[in-house]
Image: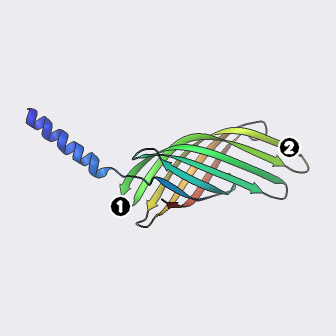
Amino acid sequence: MKKIAFTVLTVFGCLLLTNAQSISDNAIGLRLGDSDGLGAEISYQRALGDNNRLELDLGWRTGNNFDGFKLVGLYQWVWHIDGGFNWYAGAGGGVASYDYDAPTNDSETFFLIAGDIGIEYDFDIPLLLSLDFRPEIGFGDVNDDTNFDIALSIRYQF
């Protein structure tokens, strides 16, 4: 019975090890989202383990009647699919500030919570492409609604 248990544990452990996917220690690039967010963001990812990472995104926008920035931090779990494909999900929060020009001249700084789900491809070269969906809920006087941001990201891994 001990030999069977040992064999089963060994086979199960080998399966877990062969299916494990190591993620890059660092990645930096652009996250190109739609207008529900702030558009383009500078994105940085830092590995916290073999399958966990922290993502920080800084976006800003300047327009005729609008200026704003948003900083979002997400803790992500990464799962290997096949080859260079991974999918990931995460949760986090952030802070944003908007400044509206005429006619309202309003400005506001508020907090938000965010989720994230996406798919990525890790090339053999240090390039990572991803497509993700990020719902955000803002907590403020002017921006207290839900935004759904879809983005394509390109990052250099090092």
Q: Residue at x 37, y 54 (%)?
A: 81
Q: Would you say 62 lies left or right of 27 here?
A: right
- Per the image, label 2 sits on a secondary structure element best described as loop
Is any atom of residue 127 visible in this view? yes
**Position of residue 48 measured from the top left corner of the image (x, y, whole percent):** 46, 44
Residue at (62, 45) in percent of width and height: 72
Whole-percent x, y for residue 85 in the image: 41, 58
Give the Cα separation between the discs numbered 1 and 2: 49 Å
Labels in figure, total: 2
Mark 1 or mark 2: whose residue is earlier in sequence = 1
Horizontal side of residue 120 vs 140, given as left or right: left
Residue 91 location (% of width, % of height): 54, 41
How is the structure coloured here? rainbow
Task: Give the camera-side residue of 153 and 125.
Answer: 125
Q: Amino acid at mark 2?
A: Asp
Does the rendering let one see residue 144?
no
Q: Look at 55% across and 57% down and name the residue there.
A: 28
- Looking at the rendered structure, the kind of residue marked 1 is Gly
Count residues near mark 2 (Cα–Cα under 10 Å), then give few for <14, some for 14-19, many for 20+: few
Q: Which residue position holds label 2?
A: 106
Residue 83 marker: 1
Residue at left 40%, top 66%? 124
